[in-house]
Amino acid sequence: MPARSTTSVATKPQDEKITINVGYVDLGQIDLLVQEGFYANRSDLIRTAIRNQLTTHAEVVKQSVARKTLVLGIQHFSADDLRAVKAAGQTLQIRVLGLASIANEVTPELALSAIDSVVVLGALHASPAVKAALASRIR
């Protein structure tokens, strides 16, 4: 019988939802562009507009990331990662532009002992208990 592959496929994290208020005239213009076929839907236009602005300001973002020593992208912290930091007698200063995630198996006690501070420009995914425990350390 052939051996089964145990290769795991990394899945893309869910996108974050945001809510914005748009004036009626702007909304009408958005709907007109969608109706005329320039965009598939309102979200498509808004995502495109956001990407265009981020492209326009890409150099500023790059310089700020370097200056603030932020990790750009997705950074995940497992319980093993945090235990290793703790065993080394160190603590983490999590600084991420994008998504920082702390594994669900991380207890509030482990998080408190291994994480000194959290700065996330984007989204922080962690259990409600871990977020509550780290609340005073999240900036």
Image (cartoon, helix red, strand yellow):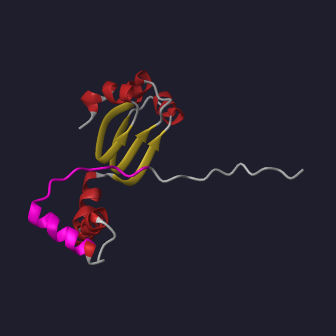
Give the residue at x 9% y 66%. 25
Instruction: State the image coordinates of residue 116 (x, y, percent, origin top left).
Output: 33, 32
Instruction: State the image coordinates of residue 39 (x, y, percent, origin top left).
Output: 30, 73
Count numbered badges in the picture: 0
Question: Residue 45's quadrant in the figure?
Answer: bottom left
Q: Is residue 14 left or right of residue 60?
A: right
Q: Is residue 80 left or right of residue 107?
A: right
Question: Residue 29's quadrant in the figure?
Answer: bottom left
Residue farthest toward the top in the current orientation of the protein? 109
> Quick check: 41 above or below 101?
below
> Quick check: 108 above or below 122?
above
> Quick check: 71 above or below 124?
below
Q: Nearer the viewer, residue 2 or 20?
A: 20
Q: Nearer the viewer, residue 61 or 42?
A: 42
Q: Is residue 107 left or right of residue 128?
A: right
Give the residue at x 90% y 50%. 1
Give the residue at x 30% y 35%. 117
Q: Nearer the viewer, residue 69 or 26?
A: 26
User: Does the magenta segment cover residue 42?
Assistant: no
Instruction: State the image coordinates of residue 4 (x, y, percent, origin top left).
Output: 78, 50
> Quick check: 66 above or below 123?
below
Q: Nearer the viewer, residue 14 or 68?
A: 14
Query: Which quadrant: the C terminus?
Result: top left
Segment tinted magenta in the rendering: 14-34
Give the residue at x 37% y 48%. 99
Residue farthest toward the right in the current orientation of the protein? 1
